[in-house]
Amino acid sequence: MPRSITQYRVFIGSPGGLEAERTCFREKLRKFSEMHDDDVVFHPVGWEDTLPGAGRPQALINSDLEGCDYAVFVLHDRWGSATGSGHTSGTEEEFRLAEALHGKKIRNIALFFKKVDPGRLRDPGEQLKPVLAFKKRIEDRKKYLFRHYVDIEQFAEVLEKLLIDWKKAHANAGSGLSIGELTTGQPRTAPSPDSPRAPQFDYWIAEAFKLSDAGNHGGALFCAEKALETAKTEEGWARTRNIWGISQFHLGRRDEALGAFSEIADRLRNSADPDRRVVLANALFNKGVALSMLGRREEEVAAYDDLLARFGAAAEPALREQVAKALFNKGVALGALGRSGEAIAAFDDVLARFGAASEPALREQVAKALFNKGVALGALGRRQEEVAAYDDLLARFGAASEPALREQVAMALFNKGGALGRNAEAIAVYDDVLARFGAASEPALREVVAKALVNKGFALDTLGRNAEAIAVYDDVLARFGAASEPALREAVAKAKELRNRLQKPPA
């Protein structure tokens, strides 16, 4: 089966005077993608790539930014000049657009500030003043990841660490093995302020949860810190410390997040109170996720084992859900450590404990466990067992209407087609993907449809049915030719390449 490669477009914005950083940025992304020869490519995008056209130049650059997945901004001692749109510089306009796209199209915004000569700070001048004001706003809001650097070598080093983080995020959230998200333990209802003049604990923690859900992790952190100041019970402290850790995690401060989750686990370890046990389970699970993102897989497995030892036999719904998620994540971690047999056993444990569960959250974990079991079996070359795992998933959830289950069904069908090879049976499976999800609007399902069409065309070509293969590639172009998502653009490019190859006259 052709390998699927995901391209992430990374925008760089900067005022003038940072040409060396822009060159370093492009070279670092190119070398990183070459050295990590797998399923992720980082493609640099900047004003240098913008094609000439009619209209305001900055608007053309903005259009390129709108098609990116990540944004990097670099500033030193210059701010730039007005763009004619009410913004004081092109970098400011680009940053405002990236902010508007953050959490929708833009996955992450990173800012770099080059150290300024201390002598300049006494009389910053008209160019440096707005840079310093912008930096202070970023520091006060605590919303975006920012780094200081001294020279180009340090810039390159920090940029590489950033790419490693983004690559890990892809591995953890991709179509193969994935981990569960951090869990907040958010209450069902948000209380009102205790007093309009002096908000107390209930108000601050409710605001922290609300802002966290909205993706405003800097604001959530501020409210969590206020809640910590007003917490009067250990349970209240623990719930607040948990959301504080989650906010730090999303702001890129993973060591601080890990410390918070570990502190909760240590303080509540011997508690018999039902509510505190739930908070403890949340913290242990979140500790495992944080360790995963730090690359500390053995410790991650130990965190999940701690949770399972304490709550594996629990009957409370909230604890059963955490047990299922911990088992699933444990399987993923074991697979990443190369312990495939143990990973499969963990996924089987999910099925044994929760296979007959009716709760939506548990059904989702069962579907993910079956899918990931199939992936693990395929990696071991056990194709028949891999197909059987996907068939089990399809038998259980093939008619499900829940979005999370539909996505697992689509991916299971796609992987089943790949496991069957390039034959008529595989083509029939890809046709099943199209019949079920061909009209779907969800991004994840559209991606599976596009990849299924490409693979169907490839299989038809292998069987010598060239005219049918060309028709399938034309279908890819008709459906997704105008799409901006990287995965769909990749599928379109592949379909064009394979179509052109088939139409090329023999030499």
Image (cartoon, rainbow, N blue to C red):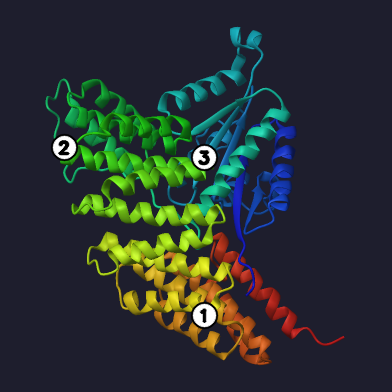
Mark 1 lies on residue = 384
99 or 395, nearer to the observer: 395
Mark 3 residue type: Leu
Dot 1 alpha-carbon crowd within 10 angstroms: few under 14, some 14 to 19, many 20 or more = some
Residue drawn at 22 percent across, 50 percent down: 318
Label 3–label 2 contact, CB within 8 A: no
Which quarter of the rendered picture does the N terminus lie within?
A: bottom right
Viewer-side label of 3, 1: 1
Front residue of 452/344: it is: 344
Rendering quarter of residue 91: top right
- Asked whether residue 423 is in view, the answer is yes
Q: How many C-alpha atoms fall within 10 Å of the one at disc 2: few (<14), some, or many (≥20)? A: few
Give the mark nearer the N terminus: 2 vs 1: 2
Q: Position of residue 135 (x, y in %)?
A: 52, 24
| x and y, in percent, of residue 44 in the image | 66, 48
**In this image, 258 relative to 354: left or right?**
right
Dot 1: what SS?
Answer: helix
Q: Is residue 126 above or below residue 461?
A: above
Which residue is labeled 3 in the image? 294
Q: Give, as a three-letter code, the residue at label 1.
A: Gln
Q: Which mark is residue 273?
A: 2
Between the residue at mark 3 and the residue at mark 2, the CA separation in whole angstroms equals 31 Å
